[in-house]
Amino acid sequence: MKNLVLYYLAVFIPLGLILLLRWQDAIGPGTLLILIVAYALIYRTWIDGSRLAAKGIISKKDRWKMMLPGMHMKHFTELYLK
C-alpha cells in the first residue's frame, strides 16, 4: 500500500464505522472496547506493517514488530508523510 490516500482511508474508515455503530447504539460499551483494542493492536499493526513492507522498509515477516512501543514513531515519516 504505497498510496498515501489509500493508506489514510484504510486507517480511518474502520475506526469511523466502529464509532458510527456505537453512535447508533448498534454495539454496547463492552463490544466497543473490544473493537477499539482489536483495531489498535491487530488491524493497525497489520496495516502499518504492510505499508512499510510494500515500501521495502521492513520485511513482511517483521510486520508484527509494529506492535512494539516506539515503532510507529521510528517510522513516522514513512508511514504518515511520504
Image (tube, rainbow, N blue to C red):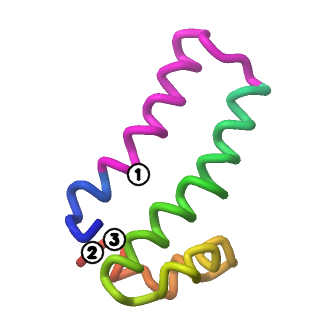
- Local packing at callout 1 (Cα closer than 10 Å; few below 14, some 14-19, many 20+) is some
Q: Residue furthest front?
A: 61
Quadrant of the snapshot with the N terminus: bottom left
- Residue that badge 2 annotates: 81
Q: Which residue appears at 53% of the width and 62% of the height? A: 46
Amino acid carrying mark 2 in the image: Leu
- Residue that badge 1 annotates: 11
Looking at the image, is mark 2 or mark 1 nearer the viewer? Answer: 1
Q: Is residue 35 above or below residue 43?
A: above
Coordinates of residue 48 in the picture (x, y in percent): 46, 68
Amino acid carrying mark 3 in the image: Tyr
Residue 18 belongs to magenta span? yes
* Label 2: which secondary element: loop
Quadrant of the snapshot with the C terminus: bottom left
Coordinates of residue 41 in the picture (x, y in percent): 66, 57
Where residue 50 sits, quadrant-wise, is bottom left
Marks 3,1: beta carbons within 8 A: no
Q: CA distance from mark 2 to mark 1?
A: 14 Å
* Label 1: which secondary element: helix
Coordinates of residue 36 in the picture (x, y in percent): 64, 42
Coordinates of residue 34 in the picture (x, y in percent): 74, 37
Marks 2,3: beta carbons within 8 A: yes
- Residue that badge 3 annotates: 80
- Local packing at callout 2 (Cα closer than 10 Å; few below 14, some 14-19, many 20+) is few
The stretch of residues the image draws in magenta is 9-29
